Amino acid sequence: MSFHYQYARPALAVDCVVFGLDEDLQVLLIQRDIPPFEGRWALPGGFVRMDETLDEAAKRELEEETGVTRVYLEQLYTFSELDRDPRERVVSVAYYALVKLSDHRVKAATDAREAAWFSVIDLPKLAFDHDRVLATALARLKGNVTYKPIGFELLPPKFTLSQLQRMYEVILEKELDKRNFRKKVLTMGFLEELDEVEQDVAHRAARLYRFDKKQYHELMKQGFHFEL
Amino acid sequence: MSFHYQYARPALAVDCVVFGLDEDLQVLLIQRDIPPFEGRWALPGGFVRMDETLDEAAKRELEEETGVTRVYLEQLYTFSELDRDPRERVVSVAYYALVKLSDHRVKAATDAREAAWFSVIDLPKLAFDHDRVLATALARLKGNVTYKPIGFELLPPKFTLSQLQRMYEVILEKELDKRNFRKKVLTMGFLEELDEVEQDVAHRAARLYRFDKKQYHELMKQGFHFEL
């Protein structure tokens, strides 16, 4: 079977940048099982089908190649350099997501030989222009932190300010001053101080906080400026 | 001539949302000269060629259909609903720009019967899903105002705070309190007060300001929070 068109068309693909938060910031990669770049690590992704939107294609490819499901993928940018794929012209719409790493066990399938998490500061050489796609996603992630609250789906329901600080440090890839961080984050208005402290810890038990759901979602819409 | 592919491919297009700033916020539309939606107003745009990137396609289509050149087009979002074009599946990458209306004389050509500016609050019925594309661009424009300084290419080199306020009012489509606006904008740090006042005005001459170039570009990168 073959399809005929009056004018040449680029192929259309999707690629997914899924960041996982753990002790450091990780990204989900697959090892390609087919040419081009066979054996090379790459972002999960593939060609868009005629009966699915881009959002649906990103979700399907991510699940097929890595087993990762129930992730909120946000559209990032569409990449169209003429030589980004050695086979032929492929335009790719990139998506990105931030997930709690421990919630997502990965399992390679279809065109992927392996699927695994890699620390963003220690990556293998990537296929195609995927280093550029990843850099764009990282910049977006770091930028968003300044304007939106994050962590609702990443932290446990009750957490300490140290846990919250660690999350920001991992995303921003820099250490933050403890006193300054606490002062700033408490003025943001999305935290609720609880009348509880940590249980069963060897060190002095720290105060627990939770997100003020209403304020959190209000600020997700409105944004703010949180320079860290 | 015809092109054959093993798998079906959507056609790939670009659409341009060009906002013009004048007494109110306007958008550049073309009247379609060919089916589908012949005679209907639409965003300038068209199919991507095999030898051009998306950025290049957007620039070319805008120039061909409206005569508008030298505009900084930024990628907005890629639209892929299955039924957005009645002919066949077309995925479209939308771009947007904000220009000083008086700098750009429009002139229809190629697939456009007419090209004209329309106030965003009084639009004709648009072709395809272009009302949705336009709404996405408007939301982005209004959102950006909160995080970035604007106006460098829209206002004259020296301007009054009233002119600056009017620009924000047009984009946000709401009236702003004069005292509040002045207080807020002066604390943002991108304005330089000049030792000059307006010339040849009937009313009491107002103080002139200019953008502090260094601060302006620094804030373009860093962002801030400017709730109006």
Image (tube, coloured by chain):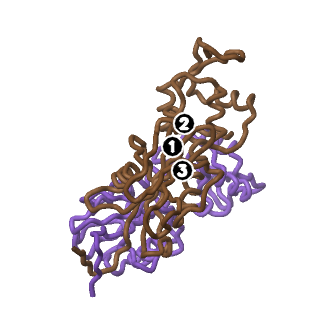
Chain colours: A brown, B purple
- Name which residue lies at 61% across and 42% down: A146
Chain identity of mark 2: A
- Name which residue lies at 73% across and 39% down: A175
The dot on residue A98 is 1
Chain identity of mark 1: A
Question: How many other residues sit within 10 Å of disc 1, few (<14), some (14-19) or many (≥20)?
Answer: many
- Kindly check if marks 2 and 1 are in contact, taking CB atoms under 8 A apart as contact: yes
Q: Do marks 3 and 2 share a chain?
A: no
Of B174 and A111, nearer the camera is A111
Tell me: A172 left or right of A8. right
Q: CA distance from mark 3 to mark 2?
A: 20 Å
Q: Is residue B51 visible?
A: yes
The residue indicated by pointer 3 is: B144
Q: Secondary structure at mark 2?
A: loop
Q: Amino acid at mark 3?
A: Asn
In the figure, A80 relative to A201: above or below?
below
Q: CA distance from mark 1 to mark 3?
A: 23 Å
Q: Nearer the viewer, mark 1 or mark 3?
A: 1
Chain identity of mark 3: B
